Image (cartoon, grey):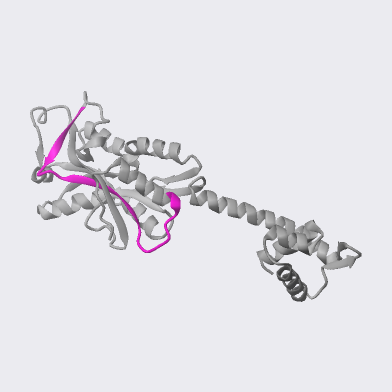
Amino acid sequence: MDIRTLRYFVEVVKQQSFTRAADALFVTQPTISKMLKQLEDELDRPLLMREGRKLLLTDSGQAVYQRGLAILDEFRQLESELEDIGSLKKGRLRLGIPPMVGTQMADLISSFRRRYPGIELLIAEFGGLTVQQAVLSGELDVALTALTAETETTLNVLPLFSHPLCAVVPRAAPWLDRTGIALAELGDWPVLIYNEDFALHRHLMRAFQAEGINPQIAVRSGQWDFLAAMAEAGIGIAILPEPICQRLDKSRLLWLPVTPPMMWQLGLIWRQGIYLPHSAQAWIEACRRHWPQGGALER
């Protein structure tokens, strides 16, 4: 039994005529007669009886008719829902965003919601490496993450924006007259960095290794405000992206650019060679419009 045969049967019962049902469905009467005969043969029982000019339902026919009405209604709802999804009137987007960049995404999320109010955003806030694994496993459709040399080659990558990394120190001596801090100097101080869950951790450790530095790591954390508080308390130097530094208390803390410049590059990632939901495609295009200077690195 298929939907088309069920639709023919229900229409015949409604119209009380094979001819009128054929006209309503834009098919020939022999086609409907053949399909209903096949349905009765498949079910191995009669569904319709003639009494004069009237078509009567057998007990089996009544069951098929009532169930058929419900099934066709569900199918119409499914067709409508699929149409809404295709036109982005409905759907959901599983999006990963690192905690430290949520505020930078607020304007984009707001404009996306205005444009696609029927799309539900399911936002997961994880560090970059966890987000990457969630995309690879299919738990997330698309994610924003820090891009590093270790970013999986099985992912499409869309670079969006980048910011310099800064050393966060107390607003006190010996930092008051400084305009920057060399990466090599960081080996002389306890450092406060993001934990291993964040791509930024790998980025920093690789930079230290390239400089031959064995860093004195005092604190690892996934919370930028905690790292800043530790820097203010004099426990060490926190390494944070410049946009995060702009949210700190300027009366208590200084942030000095690391030299040579170290950039924190953010981009979107999604799996290669898989079906990508319409909502995710719309999000990628929204990011391209929002950051047109980013450029694509789709592998």
Q: Is-magenta flag for residue 189?
A: no
Locate residue 219: give its quadrant. Answer: top left
Q: Position of residue 117 (x, y in %)?
A: 48, 39
Left or right: 188 with respect to 9?
A: left
Q: Please indicate, yes or no, whether residue 27 appears anywhere in the rendered image.
A: yes
Left or right: 179 with respect to 36?
A: left
Q: Is residue 37 above or below residue 194?
A: below
Point out the image quarter for the C terminus. Answer: bottom left
Q: Please indicate, yes or no, whether residue 222 appears anywhere in the rendered image.
A: no
> In terms of depth relative to the viewer, which is nearer, 296 or 209?
296
Task: Find the magenta span and give its range.
Answer: 253-279
> In terms of depth relative to the viewer, which is nearer, 152 or 127?
152
Q: Is residue 80 above or below residue 289?
A: below
Q: Residue at x 51, y 45 (%)?
A: 89
Locate residue 14: give its quadrant. Answer: bottom right
Q: Position of residue 30 (x, y in %)?
A: 73, 71
Left or right: 105 with respect to 297?
A: right
Residue at the right extreme of this rendering: 52
Q: Is-magenta flag for residue 263?
A: yes
Point out the image quarter for the N terminus. Answer: bottom right
Q: Is residue 131 above or below residue 113?
A: below
Left or right: 13 with respect to 289?
A: right
Locate residue 28: give its quadrant. Answer: bottom right
Q: Residue at x 55, y 53 (%)?
A: 82
Q: How many marks?
A: 0
Q: Position of residue 282 (x, y in %)?
A: 40, 48
Q: Position of residue 46 (x, y in %)?
A: 83, 71
Residue at the top extreme of this rendering: 251
